[in-house]
Image (tube, coloured by chain):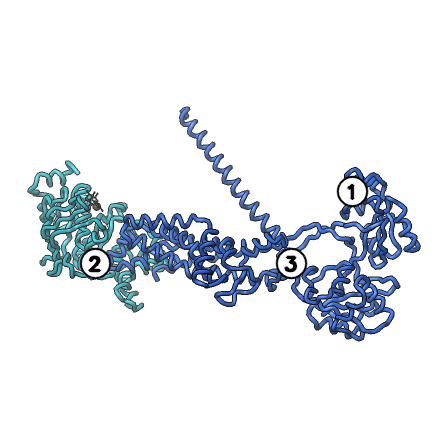
Chain colours: A blue, B cyan
Amino acid sequence: MEISANTKKIHRNENIARGVIWGFAGLTILILAWILGFILYRGFYSNNVVGYKYTDMSSDVLTLNDGSEVIFIANKGIRVKDLTADSMQELYTHVIRELNKWSDYTEQSVLCQPIAYKDESPFNSSVKAFLLGKEGLDNWKSYTTYAVDSRQMIEKVAETKGALGYIPAGDRNLLTKDVVPIPLRSIQVAMNSEALAIKDNRSFQEFTEDTLKAIFAGKVVSMTSIGGIGIAPLPAIAPNVNRSLTDNWFGPEFIPKQFDTMEGFYDYMSRNPGAVGLVDYTGYIPSDSYETVTVQRRERGMNLDLWFLIEKPAEGNAGGISYFIINTLFMILMTLLFSAPIGILAAVYLVEYAKQGPLVTVLRMGTETLAGIPSIVFGLFGRIFFVNILGMGIGFISSTLTVTLMILPTLVRTSEEALKAVPPILREGSMGLGATKWQTIFRVVLPAASQGILTGVILAVGRVAGETAVLLYTLGSSYDLVRNLHSPARVLSLHLYLLFSEAVSFDRAFATGTVLVIIVLITNLLTRRLIRKNKQMAGR
Amino acid sequence: MATMIEVRKLDLHYGDFKALHGIDMEIEENEVTALIGPSGCGKSTFIRTINRMNDLIDSVRIDGEIYYGGENIYDDRYDVIELRKRIGMVFQKPNPFPMSIYDNIAYGPRIHGKKNKAELDILVEKSLHHAALWDEVKDRIHSPAMGLSGGQQQRLCLARTLAVEPDVVLMDEPTSALDPVSTAKIEDLVHELKKDYTIVIVTHNMQQAGRISDRTAFFLNGYIEEFGTTDQIFFNPVSSKTEAYISGKFG
Ligand SMILES: Nc1ncnc2c1ncn2[C@@H]1O[C@H](COP(=O)(O)OP(=O)(O)OP(=O)(O)O)[C@@H](O)[C@H]1O
Ligand SMILES: [Mg+2]
């Protein structure tokens, strides 16, 4: 068969068009998948580099200067992974009890209840000396709870929320499953001050675990390669360091210089500019000639865990978002309850009843304009009108009404389009059977338009769930649950904004964002299912 | 044989445009009256005046009278809901509601207050039998009406109209969207239904008009050019224009 030049051209154009369309569609899908994937990934997993004045090595048993061994324990409600030795001191010595929360360490908004022994046994004196070293003995007295022996200590820790206690390592067999031993990180890295000084605009500040391991494996010839000045590092280890920990952590290539006495170690640290030493915090003696440096630790973990969902919110880094989830759902429900009937009936009026004329045109233009106005303008309006003029105050009802007003125009417009799309012959069919106008609308037109109307509702839910600007002006920022119509509160989107603007935590922000995405996803699925049900049920 | 509907000096305006000019017509009980004529001559406009479907169009103005049951249906006090219950209509394009077959048929009776399930069941079955659809759909009566074929949908619309138990059935080109087999079915039905109902049917198909109607009205430019028994119009037309149209010379 002969194919004409023109036909060939047509085929070529067809292929080009298809290619371009596929290209763009593919790109769009890729971008969307990437964004969603990124948010969900960051929401569910945290992966941060955090600097500590300690290495990652931890042990349940802490050996104090006089050789006594202590195990710190916490109530099992405390989700503690590990603590640094000086964190333990802080938890025991905070003067103002109200501030003495676990939140800085475990993101739990639980008061820390330290428990101690009263007696003057050598063991207790030694622990006391360690814990109170910095603060002086006065703070010890401010504790209200004491135990007489390990058994009672364990009991008390088990039954007191947020409790913190300690026992001699020898009593380890008394531990119950209601208390958890706390692994302590007490090994620090010290360096000679000369190596840390700024020279030629270069200064050594932090180690990564990898550089630390490289130094102690003897692989670093000059510190320039790890960001410092041109001296060869001299790895050393103090005699008070738990060797089983370090040998495990560093592996077979661990080759530090060793010492019989602490004095020998400190002497070495002071005299060698390249000295890099491992030393246990319990025996650390500060000096001008050497200081401790920061070691970076990569912390990976579940970001969005069950606790985050179900725990009561608290300030800062502590608590979960349970209340915010409930507040958000409640707000979505209330705004839909207000806006859906009004919006749909207004659309019914505009499409089915109103005489199409200048008035309707103006009304339509008005709704269109309102639908395009930035939400912050509605927020301003709500703040002045509902909060001030009507005196409703900042709180749930003011914000719900403002959000209702905000989504109403969109809802009217989408419902209007849905109603207009219902073929006129359906209306005629119904009227021809002797149905009244309202019967026709209610039984035929609305069910036939339900898909389009519900699409508008889904969009509205998305807007409510994601609204921030309006709420900033009208909802306040309380961490509480919405208990009555006037209570100020937070919803997820607002919380997300505040987390970010107050620079609280990216991890929490992403976790909150992920929950928000999932809520919107679930509402979409539910509404879709509802549409299908509705279609089957239409006319019943 | 009694006159069911009597049209007297009916004028109809769409805004400034006069679509019907002084229509006079008697529609006899238990007969089929066919309305024929070229496109745009006012057949649909006229048939819709009989159950006041034109009320739905804002710009329409109607003068003259249509008597039904001794009363002028354009009288201010006449109840249009009651009228449409008694004078049902089947449209050109099948227009089933987006619901099940059963609900489509039960729609009319329900809005007129019939709630009893057993009664509705009987009525639905009877109407479907009447529209010769029962055998085809009896197993899927609760599935969506949209799933039926075009011809089945049109018979469903007929059944839906019959379920309200009207006196008169108006049909505006009910077969124009259908295949020959479905068309034949509808034609047979019309023949069958004549016993119980009075039927007015608009058609572009001369043979169809000849086959199924007792009387024929030939519309031209908003006027009735000729009205008489179908035999007379087809075999012995008075007007030369009627003859020309019937013989396919214009239209
Ligand atoms: N809603 C309307 N508004 C204004 N004019 C109309 C309207 N409906 C019909 N007309 C006009 O009235 C005249 C008669 O129309 P009608 O639909 O009754 O014709 P018809 O005989 O049914 O034609 P067809 O055989 O094509 O269906 C036409 O000139 C048409 O343009
Ligand atoms: Mg027509």
In depth, the one of B7 and A80 nearer the eye is A80
The amino acid type of the residue labelled 3 equals: Asn
Q: Name the residue: 37% across, 51% down.
A: A418
Q: Which residue is mark 3?
A: A317
Q: Quadrant of residue A385?
A: bottom left
The amino acid type of the residue labelled 1 equals Ser
Instruction: Count residues near mark 3 (Cα–Cα under 10 Å), then give few for <14, some for 14-19, many for 20+.
Output: some
Q: Quadrant of the N terminus of chain A?
A: top left
Circle 2 residue: B84
SS at badge 1: loop
The amino acid type, in three-letter code, at marker 2 is Arg
- Residue at numbered disc 1: A203
Q: Is there a contact, CB below 8 Å, between mark 1 and mark 2?
A: no
For the question of whether residue A407 can be seen, the reply is: yes
| 3D distance between C-alphas at marks 3 and 2 | 70 Å
Co-location on one chain, circles 3 and 1: yes
Q: CA distance from mark 1 to mark 2?
A: 95 Å
For residue A125, side relative to residue B185 (left or right): right
Query: What x and y, as percent, mark residue A219?
Result: 83, 42
- Numbered label tally: 3
Query: Mark 2 falls on what kind of element?
Result: helix
In this orientation, which residue lies closer to the viewer: A295 or A245? Answer: A295
